[in-house]
Image (cartoon, rainbow, N blue to C red):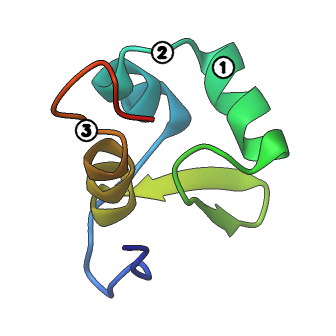
Amino acid sequence: MNRETKPGEQLRSPDETAERLDVSLSWLAKARMRGDGPRFVKIGRAVRYGDGAIGDYIRARTRHSTSEV
């Protein structure tokens, strides 16, 4: 369910993204290195997360019961 960042889509800073996901900045940085966090955009040295990528990440981890993997 990955989608590319669309032109005009709001890009969020790591601070904003960590707050929205209720995770630490450290967790978010480690997830980028592991490749298991939300998709991100690198513009120069800046890391940004598209709203769509954050939503996709949340949807991909949504479960109906605790027995789901």
**60 or 32, which lies in front?**
60
Mark pair 1, 3: CA separation: 19 Å
Measured as percent of width and height from the top left, residue 28 is found at 62, 29
Residue of label 1: 27
Q: What residue type is labelled 3?
A: Thr
User: N-terminal of the two: label 3 or label 2?
Assistant: 2
Outermost right residue: 33
Question: What label sits on residue 23 in the rendered view?
Answer: 2
| Image position, residue 46 (x, y; %) | 68, 53
Checking the image for residue 62, the label placed there is: 3
**Label 1: few (<14), some (14–19) or many (≥20) C-alpha neighbours in 10 Å:** few
Query: What residue is at 24 percent from the left and 35 percent from the top?
Result: 63
User: Which amino acid does the dot numbered 2 rest on?
Assistant: Val
Q: What residue type is labelled 1?
A: Trp
- x and y percent of residue 66 in the render? 29, 18
Please tell me whether residue 53 is drawn above or below residue 3 in the rendered image: above
Q: Nearer the viewer, mark 1 or mark 3?
A: 3
Q: Which residue is drawn at 39% across and 60% down?
A: 53
